[in-house]
Amino acid sequence: MKNNDVKTLAKGSDKAVDMVLKLLKEKLSKYNVRISRAVANNLIVDVSRRHLRDVAKIVHNELGAYVRTCVGCDERNKNGCFAVYYIFGLDDYGVNVIVRTLAPANDVKVPSIADIAPGADWCELEFRDLLGIDVTGRPVYRLILPEDWPDDLHPLRKDVPYGVRPPPVKREGVTLTELESPGIPVGPYHPALHEPEYFELYVEGETIIDVRYRGFHIHRGIEKLGESKLTYKQIPFIAERICGICGFCHSTCYVMAVEKAAKIEVPERAEFIRAMVLEIERIHSHLLWLGVACHLLGYDAGFMHTWRIREAIMKLAEYLTGSRKTYGINIIGGVRKDINKEKIQNVLRTLNYIEREVKELIDVMLSVPEVKRRLTGTGILTKGEARKLSVVGPVARASGLNRDVRKDYPYLAYKYVSFKVPVYTEGDNLSRTLVRVEEIFESISIIRQLLDRLPGGDIKVEKYEIESDKVSTAAVEAPRGEDIHFLITGKGRPYRWKVRAPTYQNIPALRPMLREQLLADAPITIASIDPCFSCTDRVIIIEIRNGKIVNAKRINIVRLSRKR
Amino acid sequence: MKFLKLFVVAKKAGTVTRKYPFEEPLITEEFRGEIKIDPEKCIGCGACTLICPPNALTMRDEGNVRLIRYFVGRCIFCGMCAEVCPTNAIAITKEFELATLDTDDLLRDLLHKRVKCRICGRPFLTTKLIKYANKDIPGSDNYADVCPECRSKLSIKNILKYRGDLDV
């Protein structure tokens, strides 16, 4: 499919969208579909439930699209139906194909496409939990809602008010697996990442034979909050608080989705500043990860020194935006804080310092034989598995997939800079480390180029109107991979706002990575996807009561702790 | 044996930690901390309470008094309030040592006197806000001390008078 035409095409441009439109019309002519253009680089394919699986097969397998996410939406007050949006991304064209199917309110079910596109496995369960849209033709279980949540209450439905707290329902403990081998719990609190998650590793001797994951312990109801309480202007600030590390990615992603839907022309200078802060965030996030990885491998000297260097970039972020984290400079229509000559000089000075120090330290770090040996050949994710699960970010790039939102779906000022996307084919922990190390240096170079070409002018537009019922998506390459926000506009606030963080797409890849591995390598392999559980868990209405994960497993933890 | 070079790196870096409470904290000149509202400049318009994303700034009217309350516990230190303030009464300070054992320590209250409507006698806007409006809009002192409800009644009356059918 990659012919010369496609290679020279400007990704995400109107021409590319037209090409995909033509291609889709040709391929889908057999089925009764309606294809229409939405805002920016999005195409909407309306299809009946009967043909959903056929269309998904063609888009995912024949056109080679990646699953970006799928979103359920309660549209009963508009058309009496529940809608499901499957967002496929055609990386070669930079175009999103949004397949929409409707399920009438008296027959709320859709066929599953998880066997065709395994990347959609989780998001199907998500809309089943939160909106009560049943998925047929696949094993279903509760993914997001806590076990003591009543069956017939679906928090994201529009008739469920915000802040509802039903009394807990008693239920039999659900066993996640039939396997008899001993399960070793990692969690409910990760020892090094200091975030709640729960992995259960099944072992035979020292070898892991299967892995189960139970997460979503820290749902904070952000989507429901955005849809029922906040206004368009407040959401950038709460979006920034979805994640403590890549918060700026989330707020940029949200404002970009709104700007696309409302067709707001953002001043170029604002786009440059946003891109610059995004890259600063990437450097600090990758340095943080390198430190944590060293710590997990028992090389604490490396951990201390990485974080010493990282402190310079944290201070730089504060100097530019006013805060070390949660910068708070993103608003719809631009940014709030400008930079001047003096600040540019300071940034360049800090970048020189960081580049020099990181180079020196990485050189030392990777020459430590223990570090190198433990990273090499562990946690392998093959290219085939990576493609099947639509993994994103450094995990995809370390497994030979050349995916990067900055190149594939150009946004902000990235079209003005040249940079390399590091791709490794081994798919082990070492390649994931090296991808991140190279990206630090690429980011430094990107910031230098951006500062060099920084245009003058305004940094924000203040007059705009946001029309209702526009479907829009925006994606940002966060340090961990592709972060995507889906938005349907409403009156004064979004009608539907869905956040898909990169870790959401990467955690399912841990199963093939951990299988047939030694138990001792599990912590570093789990950490190697740079999981961010706060991002992943953002969706639902109420926080789970502490400790009530899965009853049977809870006993396991207690028993194991007592033994010690 | 290359990994031994770490000693060189460590020697060069030296001690980086600071004895914080005894030494200067590590904040830059751009740092955003707690806000300070200047009671002299504040006119009680409530623009800050409308823009505040986490609702740390709230406004309540009671009798002759308007209360502008700043609750530091909810503040996310974004500084949006300082941007919208028409009189630049809000200053962003570098104060970040805000921990306390008593929640009341985190409340900053500002009281404004409200003007009574010339016609119906009900209090509506703050005295200072009306002064501010009179300064900016010439001729507004004729009707600035009339509440919006009475004002619309008044203007309807005037229109009718102009048309000559006042008896209605």
Image: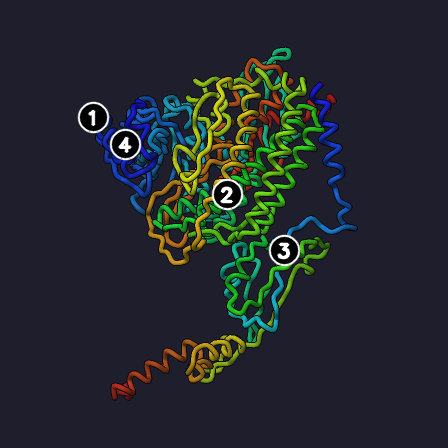
**Is residue A468 among what the camera can see?**
yes
Q: How crowded is mark 4: few (under 14 residues within 10 Å), some or many (20 or more)?
A: many
| Cα separation between marks 3 and 2 | 24 Å
For badge 3, the amino acid type reads Gly
Local secondary structure at mark 1? loop
| Cα separation between marks 4 and 3 | 50 Å
Mark 3, mark 2: which one is toward the viewer? 2
Answer above or below: position of A217 versus A402.
below
Local secondary structure at mark 3? loop
Residues behind callouts 4 and 1 on a single chain: yes
Percent x, y of residue A409: 39, 35
| Cα separation between marks 2 and 4 | 32 Å
Local secondary structure at mark 2? helix
Mark 1, mark 3: which one is toward the viewer? 3
Looking at the image, which is closer to me, A370 or A464? A370
Name the subunit of mark 3.
B
Among the 4 quarters of the image, the one containing residue A6: top left
| Cα separation between marks 1 and 3 | 62 Å
* Residue under the point 54% across and 54% down: B54
For badge 1, the amino acid type reads Lys
According to the image, label 4 marks what residue? A20
* Residue under the point 35% across and 47% down: A261
Residues behind callouts 2 and 1 on a single chain: yes
Q: Do the residues labelled 2 and 4 touch (CB within 8 Å)?
A: no
Q: If you read the primary sequence from the N terminus, does the residue marked by circle 2 or circle 4 appear first?
A: 4
In the figure, is residue A460 to the left or right of A357?
left
Quadrant of image for the N terminus of chain A = top left
According to the image, label 3 marks what residue? B33
Name the subunit of mark 2.
A
In the figure, is residue A319 to the left or right of A127?
right
Q: If you read the primary sequence from the N terminus, does the residue marked by circle 4 or circle 1 appear first?
A: 4
According to the image, label 1 marks what residue? A30
